[in-house]
Image: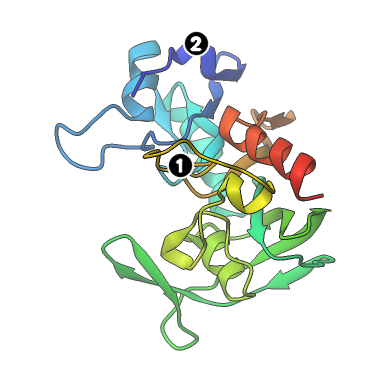
Amino acid sequence: MKIPKFTDLILFEDDNIIVVNKPPFISTLDEREGAEINMLRLAKSYHEDAQICHRLDKETSGALIIAKNPEAYRLVSMQFERRKVKKVYHAVIEGTHVFEELYIDLPILNTGKGSVSISRQEGKRAETWFQSLKYYKHYTLVECRPVTGRMHQIRIHLATQRASIAGDEMYKGKPVFLSALKRKYHLGKDQEEQPIMKRFALHAFEVTFKINEETEVTIHAPYPKDFDTLLKLLDKFDA
């Protein structure tokens, strides 16, 4: 995989904070010792005191907040703790779903080994709001606004509505193939069709938080190429 230049990812920067548009397939932090490149290492190569303020799943793209010093890290961490950071994600989900400010508050239990389940007895509080943005024949583009920040929260909350994110096989989502959208689609002989997106279709679209005691900013992260391509193909063949 081609390692991106950190400076090409920057959406916002001041003396204390950087917000980047995290590419898919790069972990936020070290997954294990000596592992592949991750966002923390990329950030430290740009600014040695950099600290990541929150996590995005490896496959999830989008807005990621990085602090340049301990004071900035504390400021942002406190906002996350008090649920003052507003996060907006966009997801492409399977099926046509009319979500009009749908509120899901199913508790989530971290079952270890990178997976979670819904557990009313043992789970931790988890709240997400969902709003449908655009309808296709077989898919829906939705806005997801998590209030809490549990692992896989948006993904499992959507799965409980039988609205799995496209490509999210862990939660019963299936990859999107052009042959399923486009009539008379033919592959060459001996060619194996690849999915339009090689990951689940979830993008951290926007984040709003305070960069100091007085100033609040909203940073918007443009779609990466694969997410943008999926939407363009849905516009063309599944509208």
Task: Give the residue displayed 45% in from the left and 21% down from the top.
Answer: 68
Q: Which kind of residue does numbered mark 2 sit on?
A: Thr
Q: Position of residue 184 (x, y in %)?
A: 66, 46
Q: Are marks 1 and 2 in contact (CB under 8 Å)?
A: no
Q: Residue at x 54, y 25 (%)?
A: 20
In the rendered image, residue 17, in percent from the top left (x then y), is placed at 55, 23
Calculate the distance from the C-alpha at mark 1 to the C-alpha at mark 2: 31 Å
Q: Is residue 146 visible?
A: no
For badge 1, the amino acid type reads Gln
The residue depicted at 67 percent of the width and 50 percent of the height is 181
Q: Confirm whether residue 47 shows in the render.
A: yes
Q: Give the left or right position of residue 237, taking residue 47 as reference.
A: right
The residue closer to the viewer here, 8 or 164, is 164
- Residue 101 lies, with reference to residue 106, above or below; the image says above
Q: Which residue is mark 2?
A: 7
Looking at the picture, tell me which residue is in the foreground, 42 or 209: 42
The residue drawn where x is 46% and y is 43% is: 193
The quarter holding residue 59 reads top left
Residue 180 vertical position relative to residue 118 in the rendered view, above or below = above
> Of circles 1 and 2, which is in front?
1
Which residue is disc 1 drawn over? 194
